[in-house]
């Protein structure tokens, strides 16, 4: 069914597509949800982050000129043995966490599975990189939405909150990192001023000239 007939009836909405993949003797079908996401202000020069899992090429709106990127927040792969592999926000998720135990022997079954995955609430991530552009925290990374996301983000939300606890904590972490970086920059500039030769050695040069040593 998955490798012969039409798969359009399996798709739960227009944001989904599919690819039939053959690698040697292995076959699988990959269903993915794509979204075009604005990641920078109009006319911004910074390019989309397309080097992380789930990010694809850039796109344009045709209405306004802004930096944007195609992202795949939800990916479901089904192989010839009907094994399911799910990737959410670029992270592989155990099948048990998807909490879908129904069969996948028919088109309707696959559509139900994809609809279930589409309705899973995902963590929105932490602050935007536009808010904290020059920090390098070890506990977080920049996700496909150009947001800071905690390395231990739980991805799937089980509460009414739109952000998991780990990503919520990033606001304080990033603020501290930014403060330290600004302080280090100020210290560096101050130290540079103190070591300028024309300030530090002015009296020495004058004394040498008086002694006819220059």
Image (tube, helix red, strand yellow):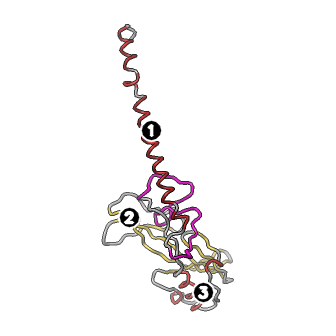
Left of 214 or right of it: where is 184? right
- Look at the picture and state if 32 lies above or below 8: above
What residue is drawn where x is 48% and y is 64%?
126
Q: CA gap, disc 1 to disc 3?
A: 63 Å
- Look at the picture and state if 80 lies above or below 208: below
Q: Position of residue 129 (x, y in %)?
A: 44, 59
Disc ID at residue 187: 1
Bounds of the magenta span? 131-160
Give the crowd class for mark 2: few <14, some 14-19, many >=20 residues within 10 Å. many
Choose top left, top right, bottom left or bottom right for residue 78: bottom right
* Residue under numbered circle 3: 2
Give the crowd class for mark 1: few <14, some 14-19, many >=20 residues within 10 Å. few
Left of 65 or right of it: where is 81? right
What residue is drawn where x is 40% and y is 28%?
196
Left of 143 or right of it: where is 23? right
Q: CA gap, disc 2 to disc 1?
A: 35 Å
Is 144 colored magenta in this rendering?
A: yes
* Residue under numbered circle 2: 67
Work out whether residue 99 or residue 115 is closer to the camera in this orientation and state it.
Answer: 99
Q: Which of labels 3 and 2 is toward the front? A: 2
Q: Secondary structure at mark 1?
A: helix
What residue is drawn where x is 66% and y is 78%?
96
Quadrant in which the C terminus is drawn: top left
Work out whether residue 175 or residue 74 is closer to the camera in this orientation and state it.
Answer: 175
Left of 62 or right of it: where is 1? right
Is 36 colored magenta in this rendering?
A: no
Q: Secondary structure at mark 2?
A: strand
Q: Secondary structure at mark 3?
A: loop
Q: Which of labels 2 and 1 is toward the front? A: 1
Q: Position of residue 162 (x, y in %)?
A: 49, 72
Mark closest to the chain's N terminus, 3 or 2: 3
């Amino acid at each position: 069914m998955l490798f012969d007939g039409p798969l359009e009836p399996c798709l739960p909405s227009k944001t989904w597509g599919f690819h039939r993949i053959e690698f040697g003797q292995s076959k699988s079908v990959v269903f993915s949800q794509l979204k075009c996401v604005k990641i920078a202000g109009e006319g911004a020069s910074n390019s989309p982050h397309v080097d992380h899992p789930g990010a694809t090429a850039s796109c344009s709106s045709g209405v306004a000129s802004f930096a944007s990127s195609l992202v795949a927040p939800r990916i479901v792969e089904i192989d010839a043995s009907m094994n399911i592999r799910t990737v959410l926000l670029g992270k592989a998720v155990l099948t048990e966490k998807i909490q879908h135990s129904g069969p996948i022997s028919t088109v309707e079954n696959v559509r139900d599975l994809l609809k279930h995955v589409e309705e899973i609430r995902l963590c929105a991530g932490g602050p935007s990189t536009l808010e904290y552009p020059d920090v390098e925290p070890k506990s977080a990374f920049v996700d496909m939405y150009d947001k800071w996301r905690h390395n231990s983000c739980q991805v799937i939300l089980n509460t009414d909150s739109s952000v998991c606890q780990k990503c919520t904590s990033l606001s304080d972490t990033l603020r501290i990192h930014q403060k330290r970086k600004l302080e280090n920059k100020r210290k560096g500039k101050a130290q540079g001023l103190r070591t300028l030769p024309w300030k530090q050695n002015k009296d020495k040069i004058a004394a040498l000239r008086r002694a006819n040593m220059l």
